[in-house]
Amino acid sequence: MKPAAPPSSCLVYTPRPLADAMVAALGVSSKGSYLEPCVGDGALLDALARRAIPRVAIRGLDVAPVKNPSDAQAQVLRGTDFLEWSRTTRERFGKIIANPPYVALNRLPKSLLASAIQVPDPFVGGTVRLRTNCWYAFLCASMNLLEANGSMCFLLPAALDFTDYAAALRSKLGAFFEEVHLHRSLSPLFEQVQDGSIVLLAHGYGKTSRYQFRTEHKDLAALVQHLNSATAIGESPTFCAGPEDRPQDHANTKLLGALVEIRIGAVTGDAKFFLLTEQQRKAARLPAAACVRVLTRASQLQSGTVGLAAWKKLKSSGERVWLFRPPDSLLGNPSVQRYFSLARRQGGCDRRRYKIKNREIWHRTPLPARPHGFISGMSVHGPWISLLPDPCLSASNTLYSIRFRTTKDADSRAAIALGLLTSKARAAMDLIGRRYADGLLKYEPSDLSRIPIPVTLDSTGATQTYDLAVKILLRGNSALAYRTADQWFQGR
């Protein structure tokens, strides 16, 4: 593969309104020290100059040797590899602002690649991995140059939201700063970048983590307007996230994992063999007693509660709702024996698969312990709980099963589920979920366990309110659903 050009030529240049808004959000002071590690066309240097920041207070670097008129606004080192320079310089900065290159490290020229993979990685330890991107290396190197209580503002690609290599950054960045703000543009800001972009704003380097929140904006104009507002740079956020919450709320907030146990559903190892529709079960002449009633996908969760009546409707509509799992008493049944003996090309089980060959009994899929409800790790509506009043159903691994740790009555359980629909909880979800390129968020059980939700001793009426909130959510009006949950807790 032909190596990429030096990083400065890979930059997507910052529009002037966005550059000015990033400087405003970062906060400026004539007494501070500033770093712009990838000057490019100088848009960010010009924005700093428009705020009357003295030239001597700004350090700029760029690997390209050709000077730019904006270089006069700062002390610029041209022809300098920032990633190498960052490991040897003694300079430190109170504020760092950047629009780094978006290029995979394995496409860099060898000399630049050698510098990138020696940059210390504060999120995973060691040094930056080869499978990451240049923007990731620039952010890691910049953090290593921040003064105590320093701030940074980076314009980053949407890859921050969903790539594997940025997973540790997403989950741990908040531990390094007092405040972390993510501002996502849902529309592309640049012709060269088809996905939306993210402005990452972090204040208070090295201080105790207090606030993390995320805001999504429909386009560049909305993003710029918000960054220029006071709420972007100093006011307490409306929605907080993470175990470190506002002090006055902390006593009435618990992590979801302290209230419920979340487990992945049954992992069959061969879904086509084990998961059946009613028509398939009858065609194979399998007794109903040879199967377990299950839910197998998020779309089957259609209300705040789910039970046998809902399962029967799914069965009648041709959904896969049976898990083949014959008890010992039916192992000699002729139909069960015939189903066992099917060849793979005829729909039989592929017993070579890892999950199956490692079971003590190959056809005995492990089941989650008597669920109290189900939750989807990936849904267009975000995670929410469908409560199971009677333990009559189980679920496959496309869903998670939950068990309440202590609460037993319906209203108390509904109050916990309702807490997951509050605006505070939803804001926390946006920060910790893994975002895919199509906008869907994926959550693992460990992610969901870290979501803070409000708790109350008075759960009277929670079941009715929760059913209403879920109906609103599934109709597509998420804002009203969250407001319904918020108002219920405010009335306690």
Image: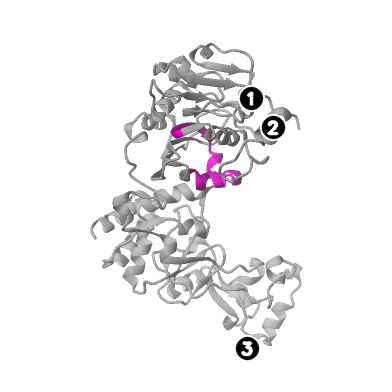
**Residue 329: which disc?**
3
Residue stretch in magenta: 148-173
Answer above or below: position of 356 versus 481. below
Answer above or below: position of 323 versus 39. below
Q: Which amino acid does label 1 sit on?
A: Asp
Q: What residue type is labelled 2?
A: Leu
Q: Which residue is drawn at 35% across and 59% down?
A: 419
Location of mark 1 (residue):
81
Q: Position of residue 393 (x, y in %)?
A: 49, 74
Location of mark 2 (residue):
113
Tell which residue pokes out farthest to the left in this image. Answer: 491
The reply to whether residue 105 is visible in this rendering is: yes
- Sequence-wise, the earlier of marks 2 and 3 is 2
Taking the magenta stretch, the answer to whether it contains residue 209 is no
Q: Residue at x 70, y 71 (%)?
A: 358
Secondary structure under the numbered disc 2 in the rendered image: helix
- Report the colour scheme: one colour
How much space separates mark 2 and mark 3, taking CA atoms?
A: 63 Å
What is the quadrant of residue 373 in the picture? bottom left
